[in-house]
Structures are given as structure tokens and as C-alpha cells.
């Protein structure tokens, strides 16, 4: 029985297995879809589809500069052991290289791109799922082209940071230390904003509201005129900026200056200019509800 490209696509969607394996399965099954699925299951290939529904909240957050392009990507798996798996880490680096080369619009587009070995990124991922035995997902990525990007990976992939800087000519190879210092600051303190100019009016209004309410509860402040309390609040906003905005934060390596002052003093020492453009910080599993295993139940299932 003959089969078409549409049949291969259908089998791929049913099983999550790569196109080449699906084509081979239909060939072995003489075009019979049910027999092709059975053939894949016998080979253990269709198990990738079953694993796809399992929660993946571990893995790594990775950052690198590839051919001058800064890339940060989070790839999730089910257990933290996978972060030490060589095959998994090869896949993560391969995905980063694809992102740098092709600039995909989103994860769905990324999955359809060539991985570089005759397979798509999705097909390569399915192969890794089968070998490693855990669900794997590319969750998110960021890409910076232009300027100077500096990567930093914290604690073996728990946090990945890319800092993108605009520098004057001749400083491109001299700002790595500055970029890394800023990336480490971002990894450690996780600022809500990069600069105070990014703080929206609704955030400022909410902070003012909270501060006014706190003073109303303070016996020493409650009896002061509202105008006086408003002026005090305006003064306290400076502290909000210093705690929540990267460039206004106290520089962790030297508390006598802010990050912005450190950047400017470094530029002066190097004889040029350094301007912060953008950054991204990925923390693995951030916001994902992790599976809560019940050890007693797991043991009970094993002995039945």
C-alpha cells in the first residue's frame, strides 16, 4: 500500500516521532497507519509522545555568544540530574546555535528549523527524549544582535543572563569584565527594571499608596500634614529605585557607587563610552508548578 507525505505528517503528529522514523515505519508497514504506530511502539519510539505530557520544571538556563549574537535559552526537563547529562547539554547548545543563526520568531518556529544534522529541532528533541527518558521542552529564549553581548551562567545553569551593551569603537574587546559584573548583579539581585525611566506611573502610584498607608499607621507620622507626608514619600521613592532598578542599584562589588556610576567610571578608564542597552535573566523552572511526588505512593506502586 502506497503512502503520501500527508500520511507521514499525520503519523508524526500522532506519535511525536521524527519525520524520517515515521517514513520508515510506514514503509515497514506498507502504508498501514495502525501497523506503523505499532512498529514505532515496538521500537520504543512512540514513547516520546507519552512523556510529552509530564511536567518539566528542571533543566538549565543557558547563555552564550555565538558568532557575535547573544543568546539566552531555557530548556526544561523533569529532573535536576538531566542538567549534568552530556547529551542534554549538547542539545541545549545546539538549540542556542540555531537561535543565533536563524532568529526564529518564537518557540514554535524554532522547532521547525533545521538542527544541522538533517533533522528539525523538534525531531532532535524527540530523539533526546527517547534516549534520556524524560520529557524535554524549550521554554523560552532571547536573542541580541548588534552591540556587545556578555553571557553569564550561574550555578551550572540555574540562572542564565545576557547583557547587551553599546560601546564606542575600540572598546568591543575590553568590556567583557564590565558586562560580566553587570550580569552577575542581575543574577544575584534580579531587578524588576533596568532603569528608573522604565518604572511606569501605575507602579509609582501603587508604591506611593503603600507608603502613605504605612505612615498613617505610624503614630509619629500620622499627625503630620498630608503635604509633609507626600514629600517624605517622594524622598522614599529614591530608595525604591535603588532597590528595584539595575542602574540605580548599589554595585555589589563596590557599595560606594551605583551600577550606572560603575559603568561610567569603567568607560572613562578605558577611554570611551559604555551604554547599557538591554539584558535578559532566565531562571530555570521560574513560574512552573513543579510536580510533588509522594514517596510512599511511588513505593507502593512498585511493589504491587
Image (cartoon, helix red, strand yellow):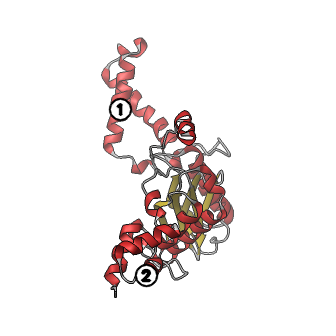
Q: Is residue 96 above or below residue 251?
A: below
Which quadrant of the rendered structure holds the N terminus? bottom left
Q: Rounded to the nearest whole Å, what is the CA distance between mark 2 and mark 1?
A: 63 Å
Residue at point 43%, 77% (across, down): 22
Residue at point 51%, 78% (across, down): 101
Q: Which residue is mark 1?
A: 208
Q: Which residue is mark 2?
A: 23
Residue at point 48%, 60% (across, down): 137
- Is 64 placed left or right of 231 in the picture? right
Q: Can residue 130 be seen here?
A: yes
Q: Is residue 297 above or below residue 124?
A: above
- In percent of width and height, residue 127 lies at 53, 69
The 10 Å Cα crowd at callout 1, few under 14, some 14 to 19, many 20 or more, is: some
Q: Is residue 157 above or below residue 240?
A: below
- In the orientation shown, which residue stands out farthest toward the bottom? 2
Question: Relative to the observer, which residue lies in front, 128 or 298?
Answer: 298
- In percent of width and height, residue 119 lies at 50, 79
- Is 31 placed left or right of 247 in the picture? left
Amino acid at each position: 500500500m502506497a503512502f503520501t507525505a500527508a500520511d507521514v505528517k499525520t503519523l508524526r503528529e500522532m506519535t511525536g516521532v521524527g519525520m524520517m522514523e515515521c517514513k520508515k515505519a510506514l514503509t515497514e508497514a506498507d502504508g498501514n497507519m495502525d501497523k506503523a504506530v505499532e512498529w514505532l511502539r515496538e521500537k520504543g519510539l512512540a514513547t516520546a509522545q507519552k512523556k510529552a505530557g509530564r511536567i518539566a520544571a528542571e533543566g538549565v538556563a543557558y547563555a552564550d555568544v555565538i558568532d557575535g549574537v547573544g543568546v539566552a535559552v531555557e530548556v526544561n526537563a523533569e529532573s535536576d540530574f538531566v542538567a549534568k547529562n552530556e547529551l542534554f547539554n549538547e542539545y541545549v547548545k545546539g538549540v542556542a546555535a540555531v537561535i543565533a543563526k536563524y532568529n526564529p520568531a518564537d518557540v514554535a518556529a524554532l522547532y521547525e528549523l533545521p538542527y544541522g544534522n538533517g533533522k528539525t529541532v523538534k525531531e532532535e528533541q524527540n530523539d533526546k527524549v527517547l534516549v534520556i527518558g524524560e520529557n524535554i521542552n524549550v521554554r523560552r529564549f532571547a536573542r541580541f544582535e548588534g552591540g556587545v553581548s556578555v553571557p553569564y551562567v550561574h550555578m551550572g545553569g540555574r540562572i542564565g543572563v545576557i547583557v547587551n551593551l553599546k560601546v564606542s569603537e575600540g572598546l568591543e574587546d575590553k568590556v567583557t569584565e564590565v558586562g560580566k559584573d553587570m550580569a552577575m548583579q542581575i543574577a544575584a539581585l534580579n531587578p524588576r527594571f533596568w532603569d528608573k525611566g522604565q518604572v511606569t506611573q501605575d507602579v509609582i502610584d501603587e508604591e506611593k499608596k503603600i507608603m502613605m498607608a504605612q505612615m498613617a499607621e505610624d503614630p509619629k507620622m500620622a499627625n503630620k500634614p498630608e503635604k509633609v507626608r507626600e514629600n517624605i514619600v517622594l524622598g522614599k521613592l529614591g530608595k525604591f529605585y535603588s532597590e528595584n532598578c539595575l542602574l540605580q542599584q548599589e554595585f555589589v562589588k563596590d557599595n560606594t557607587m551605583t551600577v550606572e556610576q560603575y559603568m561610567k567610571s569603567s568607560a572613562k578608564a578605558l577611554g570611551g563610552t559604555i551604554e547599557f542597552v538591554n539584558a535578559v535573566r532566565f531562571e530555570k523552572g521560574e513560574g512552573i508548578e513543579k510536580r510533588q511526588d509522594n514517596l510512599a505512593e511511588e513505593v507502593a506502586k512498585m511493589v504491587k
